[in-house]
Image: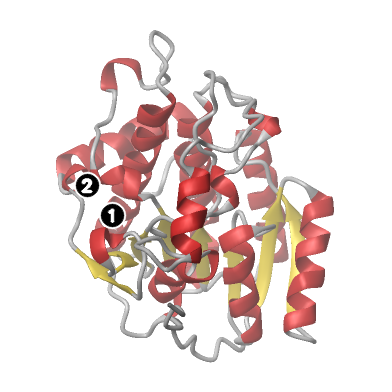
Amino acid sequence: MPRTPIDITVPDLSGKRAVITGASDGMGLGMAARLAAAGAEVILPVRNPRKGEAAISTIRRAAPGAKVSLRSLDLSSLASVAALSDTLSEEGAPIHILINNAGVMRPPNRQSTADGFELQFGTNHLGHFALVARLLPLLRAGRARVTSQISIAARRGRINWDDLNWERSYHGMRAYSQSKIAFGLFGLELERRSRAQGWGISSNISHPGVAPTSLLAARPEIGRGQDIPQYRLIRAMSARGILAGTVETAKLPALMAATDPGAKPGVLYGPSGPGNLGGPPAEQRMYPPLRSADEAARVWRVSEQLTDTAFPM
């Protein structure tokens, strides 16, 4: 049965500067292309320049005349985060949209970032935390909307406070879930603190549901030589329009959260189909692990300590 097309309207973004991490392929590339087509100046911070150049070519084929450019960023290195922040600060242009989309999922064995953190926690959460902290003046100048991409894996699990870096007993999926719970709590706490401190930015969170994205495929750079076992099933379900979304639909919740004039701060957006695995994007009920403001404040404090990065009071 043909799949019913699903899409959203992205408003005119002329004069806006957008930064999106993880935009060299997959969902992130699709989001960047839509932002550029809507008139935004789009900054792609990438780890792999060759993939980044290919992404720019793809965007410009879809949107001739697109204003899109690369910057260097490796979220698994706080030094790299600081360097990007310094570069953008020197450029001085306000940031109006920030989509924290990049992520890494389920290395088969525990790996560490350049700063010694468990790879998923350090990349998915701490790297983005430090990036937002360092870019805060530019975000405030642009009265930005910050959208942080979490995962359906954050609807259950917990923060492993006794072993945040999984040094004693590594479990890839639980560590991934923790990284996305921490990141979601950060996105919600960012909204609370912006309101309390008068920062003038808004923050919400999104998740893509389940779709056959490159996140699930073989990733030799993290030691995963083969696709995740469920990848073949997800591809088959997606192709047949059964529950799972597509790469094209999976990008829509973050796009809605980041650009829709009616999107709300402090809210979770995701697919609205059965099980929230696929379907049109919509506001969703907050996942239980993300509901505690006390837990969010604790994540914030610990993240400041671990990254040696402080937000202004």
Is residue 250 or residue 284 the one in the foreground?
A: 250
| Image coords of residue 214 (percent x, y) | 60, 50
Residue 15 against residue 276 in the figure, above or below: below
Is residue 127 or residue 155 the one in the foreground?
A: 155
Label 2 to label 1, Cα distance in Å? 8 Å
| Residue at horizontal 30 percent and vertical 44 percent from the top | 154
| Residue identified by numbered label 2 | 290
Quarter of the picture containing the N terminus is bottom left
| Image coords of residue 54 (percent x, y) | 81, 62
**Disc number at residue 163?**
none
| Residue at horizontal 59 percent and vertical 24 percent from the top | 115
In the drawing, does residue 2 fall left or right of residue 217?
Answer: left
Extreme residue toward the front, this view: 1
Is residue 251 in view?
A: yes
Q: Are marks 2 and 1 in contact (CB under 8 Å)?
A: yes
Whichever of labels 2 and 1 marks the residue nearer the N terminus, that label is 1
Picture quarter containing residue 260? bottom left
Mark 1: amino acid: Leu
Mark 2: amino acid: Leu
| Residue identified by numbered label 1 | 188
Q: Nearer the viewer, mark 2 or mark 1?
A: 2
Label 2: which secondary element? helix
> Across the whole image, how many numbered discs are drawn on residues?
2
In the drawing, does residue 286 fall left or right of residue 136?
Answer: left
Residue 225 against residue 212 in the figure, above or below: above
